[in-house]
Image (spheres, helix red, strand yellow):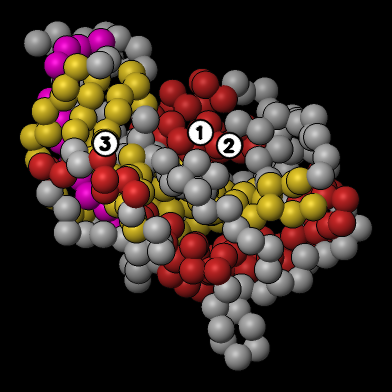
Amino acid sequence: MKKLLLGATLISLAASAAPLAHSQQNSCLQPTVYLSVIDRKGEVIEDVSPGQFAAFYRGKPARILSLAQDRGPRRVLILLDASGSMESTHTLDFDVADEVLDRLPPGTLVGAMVFAKQDTGVPVLTPDRDSVRKQLRALQDDKHLPKAIKKTTALLDTIQESLQAFGSPQEGDTLYVISDGEDNSSRLNWRKLDDQLLERGIRVFAMRIDWTGVSLSADDNLPDVITSTGGSAVVLPLDLVRYGELTYKQPLRDTTGKISRLALQIGVQVRIITDSQKMRLQLPEPARGKREWQLRFSDPKLSKDLILIYQHTLPACPASAPND
């Protein structure tokens, strides 16, 4: 197994706070966000308090009004990239989808879409994960995939289409993308997609293949979307020169049942999806347009042992939002 890049930047565990802009109870001055804290071993830290954090907006302190554990029900849609650039990891990609399904709590509403330039259609989310797994296993056989799916990739367009599966927004809605992030067919600009995700409070998580050894010409805005919306990515670096002709065969679990590091990191992601802290803020001033903010540990020494996972962008205030 290649060494996974688990730094705070490369793992993209930079953002786990989806502001619930769709909730009429939250004003622009008092957004609610999700956050998580993990240690360097990947363990989620639950025992946290408001005094351990310092929030800032436009360089001014923002007051933390409340902080509470949130284990509310989740809806999770898996998007699996079956384009040509992912052919070498085809088996791994479907195994990762299985791993996510296995680790989600019972009762979680789940669904899956397989895509490249086209996709398999927007699914109905269901608590029956076995039916979703059966669908994925059928699509794992290439002969069951439409030929158009396997050509170029329209990742951003697929993400936008997938939003239909959620209907009315709910707290904790999540997309889990399995892809290398390459996009050479989307018509949608990633910033416009980002606006839509932020407005609906949807976090984007991913298992990303990072092709090394060559420079790729296709766009890759998946890390930007992940960071902005409040998700995380586990990154698996693979040499494109080598795996352009070979199949990646490292399993998530070996024949003895030993779990790989990749599977463990996926487990951390699922824990962040399903079990986060919910923080309510009091911003020092209103603003229009998307807004960046900062969250830090009050004690800088904590950052040596802990990783703070939070969203870096708040959604735009609606024109009718109050100014005070």
Q: Which residue is mark 2?
A: 222
Query: Is residue 96 in view?
Result: yes
Three-letter amino acid code of the residue under disc 1: Val
Membership of 276 in magenta stretch: yes
Among numbered discs 3 and 2, the one appearing first in the sequence: 2
Q: Residue furthest bottom?
A: 256
Secondary element under disc 2, as helix, strand or loop, is helix
* In the foreground, 58 or 172: 58
Mark 3, residue position: 296
The part of the image, by quadrant, that contains residue 136 is bottom right
Q: Nearer the viewer, residue 161 or 155?
A: 155
Residue where numbered disc 1 is placed: 225
Question: x, y percentage for residue 91?
Answer: 72, 67
> Looking at this rendering, what residue extends furthest in the right direction?
245
Labels 3 & 2 near each other (Cβ < 8 A): no
**Going from the N terminus, do you reach mark 1 or mark 3 first?**
1
Q: Is 123 within the magenta?
A: no
* C-alpha gap between disc 2 and disc 1: 5 Å
